[in-house]
Image: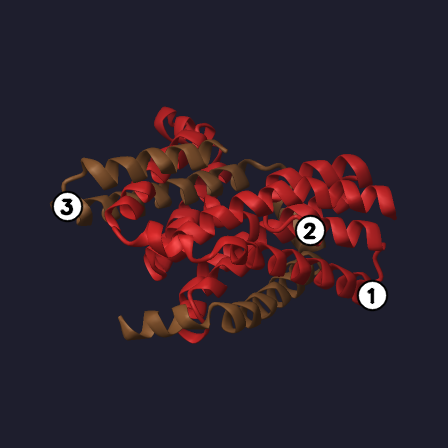
Chain colours: A red, B brown
Amino acid sequence: MVILAVIALVLGTFYGLSGLEFTLFDYLASHTDYILYATMVLVGISVGLHESIVEQMKKYHLKLLLIPMGIVAGSLIGGVICSFVLNEPMRESLAISGGLGWYSLTGVAIGNLSGAEYGSIAFLSNLMREIISFFVIPVIAVKFNYYTCIAPAGATSEDTTLPMMIRYTDEKTVVFSVLNGVICSACVPAIMSFCYAAF
Amino acid sequence: MEILIFMLIGVVIGRFCFPRKLKKLNEKMQVFMTMLLIFAMGVMLGRRENLINELTSLGVKSLVFCLVPTILSTIIVYFLTERFFDKDKKEQEGE
């Protein structure tokens, strides 16, 4: 799976760099929403086939919030550390680390608010978070526990990194992963607004 | 939000009308769709102007901004889930 992911990423990047234009590839690249929706239906089918999952979810209630809270706290503490280590402003450091892997939003938003350099760092660092997640999820699933696989993925745990959860964890963790992604995605704009209002 | 709606549609299909014998095919389709998503992400990256320049000039700083928050998130979530979700881990091991 990881090897396939690397091959797909490399092929896509080379195709994008080459400047070639194939209708099918261009259509796919510009309609990722539809691919994602189709994937989600397939994921939903897997969850639906797992009969006891609804009963299992009922046990959790507020505990569901612990994972996104841990992700946001860890990311923001990381932003504070980066600010001191790299000698960068606290506002931009927190905003970049608070992107939680959502590179498309943070790259554009921070670029508009703080200039192209910080926009590029936000884009690259959050993109790296997503790509690194692909590779560490299988390792975390074996060495730590299934739930921890959601942590590196951050806001992407509901979409691009979700298939890795499906492959390497269980149906219950997949549902946690989707809910975590929804909560983290809602937190990102709030974190960014807070950073630019408070600092 | 749309993502949740599509997933719920899938859950209903899986719960009530999806043939169990097609479970493996469904898993293979998920892998295929994932590869399409990753490929599309690569295309988007390759089409980004100045990608190579950005990587060479800001790559190390971006990597630090990626690694420190990611590692800390992972550590905190690990301790939280070990503390509050411990029974489920044992269930996983018992399965």
Element type at marker 1?
helix
Circles 2 and 1, Cβ within 8 Å, touching? The answer is no
Residue B84: where, in percent of width, then height? 52, 69
Q: Which residue is mark 3?
A: B20
Q: From this viewpoint, is residue B20 visible?
A: yes
The mark closer to the camera, 3 or 2, is 3
Query: Position of A117 compared to A67: left or right?
Result: right
Alpha-carbon neighbours of circle 3 within 10 Å: few (<14), some, or many (≥20)? few
Alpha-carbon neighbours of circle 2 within 10 Å: few (<14), some, or many (≥20)? many
> How far apart, in angstroms, are the residues tagged by discs 3 and 2?
41 Å
Alpha-carbon neighbours of circle 1 within 10 Å: few (<14), some, or many (≥20)? few
Outermost right residue? A199
Q: From this viewpoint, is residue A165 visible?
A: no
Q: Which residue is mark 1?
A: A84
- Pointer 1 indicates a residue of which chain? A
Q: How many marks?
A: 3
In the figure, A95 relative to B18: above or below?
Answer: below
The mark closer to the camera, 2 or 1, is 2
Residue at 83 percent of width and 57 percent of height: A88
Q: Which residue is mark 2?
A: A98
- Pointer 2 indicates a residue of which chain? A
